[in-house]
Image (spheres, helix red, strand yellow):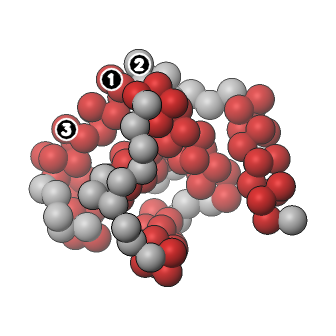
Amino acid sequence: APSLNRVTKFLTDLFEICGATGEIIIYVLVLLKRLLTTTGWKIRAASWRSMVICALRLALKVEEMPMVSAHSMHRVYPLFTPREFVNMENTFLKLVDYRIVVSQKEFSQQTRDIAEKIF
């Protein structure tokens, strides 16, 4: 499994490149939680990056923020081709039954969960 420092560096770099706000990061966490709950999957060393990238791209789209193209994402994370990023995103959408809108209740709950872990 990746070290905490490695995960933190990847997420920090990715969110900086995308200009992700705190709200977007919480949105990403809600989408990831939804994916894991819906599928019964666990976070694995081989898949966590692609899950985060898909959730981030979807969150940016829903919140109508500047989009990071699949080509740009390929430059940041060259393990996947632009086409593979698009395919992964489509698979993510299918797995969560196209439910990518986050309610205020879900957003507030995730914010409280984070606050409880920090403080």
Badge 1: residue crowd in 10 Å (few <14, some 14–19, many ≥20): few
In the rendered view, does 105 fall on the left or right side of 72?
right
Badge 2: residue crowd in 10 Å (few <14, some 14–19, many ≥20): few
Q: How many marks?
A: 3
The residue beneath circle 3 is 87
Sequence order check: which comes first, mark 1 or mark 3? 3
Q: Are marks 1 and 2 in contact (CB under 8 Å)?
A: yes
Give the quadrant of the N terminus.
Answer: bottom left
Of the residues shown, which amino acid type is indicated by label 2?
Asp
| Distance of label 1 from label 2 (alpha carbons) | 5 Å
**In the rendered image, the vertical position of residue 24 relative to residue 109, given as above or below:** below
The residue beneath circle 2 is 97
Sequence order check: which comes first, mark 3 or mark 2? 3
In the rendered view, does 89 fall on the left or right side of 60?
left
Of the residues shown, which amino acid type is indicated by label 3?
Asn
The residue beneath circle 1 is 94
Residue at image coords 16%, 53% = 82
Of the residues shown, which amino acid type is indicated by label 1?
Lys
In the rendered view, does 9 fall on the left or right side of 81?
right
Residue at image coords 39%, 71% = 2
Measured from the top left, where is residue 80 in percent x and y?
16, 58
Mark 1 lies on a secondary structure that is helix
Mark 3 lies on a secondary structure that is helix
Badge 3: residue crowd in 10 Å (few <14, some 14–19, many ≥20): few
**In the rendered image, the vertical position of residue 102 relative to residue 112, given as above or below:** above
> Of all residues shown, which one is farthest toward the right?
119
Tell me, for residue 23, which label it has, or none: none
In the rendered view, does 59 fall on the left or right side of 57?
right
